[in-house]
Structure formats: structure tokens, C-alpha cells
Image (cartoon, rainbow, N blue to C red):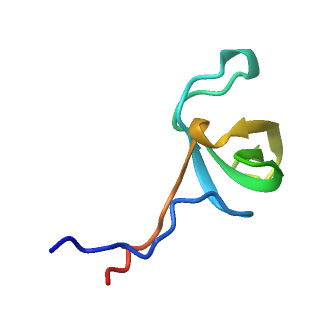
Amino acid sequence: MKKKTLMSTAVQLLDVVSLREDLPERSLSCGQVGTVVESLAPNVFEVEFCDNAGRTYASLALQADQIMVLHYRPPQVA
């Protein structure tokens, strides 16, 4: 019997996400961490990237397949 996870993989407002690809034109590398600050269209999100002092160094629209939602606790199982 396969267990079902309750943790959603859908991108939500204020999710912490990781970039899945390099974006050299924006000086961003795969793995950089940002926060979803706006849903712009289906599967398109404004993601803000900040330094350790909280200063924004990049903010751009990204497709859902360009980012991965990060999780800080184990998934709940049914």
C-alpha cells in the first residue's frame, strides 16, 4: 500500500524556494534561495532574493518549473 503525503508541492505565497537553474543574465545561480512574494499568473511567481542583511538583490518573475519549494519539516503521511 502506497502512503500519501499531505505536504503540498504547489507554490504558495511566502514559500521559501530554491532556484533550479542558473540565470547568468540576472547573476543568479542554481540553488540560490528566495521567497515567493506575489502570484502573477497561473504558475508564474514573483520571487525576491535577499542577502543575509535582508537587502533585496534580485526580484523577478519565475515559472513554477524554475523553482523548488523548500521544506523545513518532514512530510505528514496518511
Q: How many numbered marks have been drawn onto this rendered protein structure?
A: 0
Location of residue 66 in the rendering, given as x and y in whole percent from the top left corner: 60, 35
Location of residue 43 in the rendering, given as x and y in whole percent from the top left corner: 70, 46
Horizontal arrangement in the rendering, residue 7 relative to residue 75 (left or right): right
Location of residue 29 in the rendering, given as x and y in whole percent from the top left corner: 58, 27
The extreme left residue here reads 1
Location of residue 69 in the rendering, given as x and y in whole percent from the top left corner: 55, 54
Horizontal arrangement in the rendering, residue 7 relative to residue 22 (left or right): left
- Could you tell me which residue is drawn at 75 percent across and 22 percent down? 26
The extreme top residue here reads 25
Which quadrant of the figure contains the C terminus?
Answer: bottom left
Residue 50 visible from this viewpoint: no
Which quadrant of the figure contains the N terminus?
Answer: bottom left
Would you place residue 78 above or below residue 64 in this image? below
Q: Nearer the viewer, residue 6 or 35?
A: 6
- Could you tell me which residue is drawn at 58 percent across and 23 percent down? 22
Q: Nearer the viewer, residue 4 or 21?
A: 4
The extreme front residue here reads 1
- Could you tell me which residue is drawn at 73 percent across and 54 percent down? 36
- Could you tell me which residue is drawn at 36 percent across and 72 percent down? 5
Residue 39 visible from this viewpoint: yes
